[in-house]
Amino acid sequence: MIRIAHITDVHVFSPPRPWELTPKRLLGTVNLYVFGRRAHFCRTVQKALPGAVARTNPDFLICTGDLTAQATTREFEDFLDIFSPLLHQQPSFLIPGNHHTSTVAAQRDKPIEDRFSRWTGEGLWPRLHLPADGLALVAIDSCRAHPLSSGLVDPDQLKRLDELLASDVLENRKVLILLHYPLRDRHGEPYGPATRSLSNAAAVESVLLRHAHRITAILHGHEHHGFQTTLQNQESSIRILNPGAGGYAHLPKRDRTAHFNLYEIEGENLSIQRFRYSSEQQDFEPEPGGAYATGR
């Protein structure tokens, strides 16, 4: 049996220094402070997350993007202060989120890959990780600097993805696709709105469905309220799993809080344990009723 922890959208935030306030970061800072989005995430919860994940004793850890809020130097340092012990506990795998490439400079300089190359890997995307016999992780970079925060898997990467999924190296392996942007919403419909979606999601879906017999699940983030659904056509279906934001503040009036997932793969089966943050316990605990039973 293989145990895999999945966290996403932690959004560690630290106020940017004046020289870091590019127009896009200035807009993001206004959104965080003036429109209150900063209150949606909580450093107390973020500090509780790595210990809770570590106690599940996973064989591997996956993070599907947005470790930080604005990809500043201070945020990356703060993230490492909190999460470094967890990242080193077991093999860990990270992909970028849209908050890591929100500016042209960030897309060009790739700060997450510069600081976290040990866990992102190097080279062209998609990146293949073979962490254990019978398991393959295919990591896709779907993020770009865009005024509407929409994503894109560029045509060259999409071609390489198609070739990789057809290759013999994946024979007899359970394949997990790591993607930041959702393909589908919680109702199984194409994910929207266009201002925060993957602009060529249909093309990505077409490639994945062509190789559905090899794909065990698509793991993603971006949408802060977790859900599970399926990508399917008349011949095939693939599970889609999003735990929800790992650094989310507990908002009892909306019954919203932080989550992470633990997957257990044994033979042909993939089972899910989902953990949610409890403000009473100030820690994560199994979701009442089982994974996704709360609908949040």
Image (cartoon, rainbow, N blue to C red):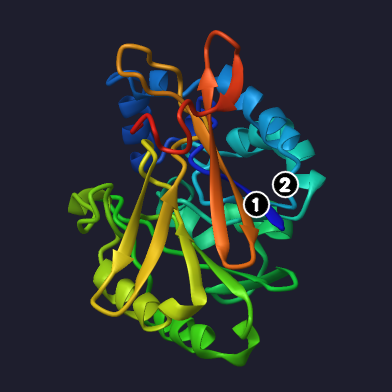
Residue 58, numbered circle:
2
Q: 185 or 74: nearer the eye?
A: 185
Q: Is residue 11 above or below residue 126?
A: above
Residue drawn at point x = 35 percent, y = 77 percent: 209
Quadrant including the C terminus: top left
Residue 4 is labelled as 1
Quadrant of the image occupied by residue 255: top left
Near-viewer residue (141 or 163): 163
Marks 1 and 2: in contact by CB < 8 Å?
yes
Query: CA gap, disc 2 to disc 1?
Result: 5 Å
Mark 2 surroundings within 10 Å by alpha-carbon count, few (fewer than 14), some (14 through 19), many (20 or more): some
Mark found first going from the N terminus, 2 or 1: 1
Q: Nearer the viewer, residue 31 or 140?
A: 140
Q: Can you give x and y, in whole percent of width and height, for residue 122 in the image?
A: 66, 69
Q: Is residue 162 left or right of residue 209?
A: right
Q: Residue at x 30, y 60 (%)?
A: 198
The residue depicted at 43 percent of the width and 52 percent of the height is 241
Question: Picture coordinates of residue 259 (x, y %)?
Answer: 50, 33
Which amino acid is tagged 1? Answer: Ile
Query: On screen, 81 above or below 151?
Result: above
Q: Which mark, by number, is residue 40?
A: none
Q: Specify whether residue 157 is in view.
A: no
| Position of residue 158 measured from the top left corner of the image (x, y, whole percent) | 40, 79
Left or right for 2, reference 21: right
Question: Quadrant of the image for the N terminus?
Answer: bottom right
User: Who is closer to the viewer here, 107 or 130?
Assistant: 130
Left or right of 81 on screen, residue 147? left
Per the image, label 2 sits on a secondary structure element best described as loop
Identify the amino acid type marked 2.
Answer: Pro
Query: At numbered mark 1, what does the secondary structure look like: helix, strand or loop?
Result: strand
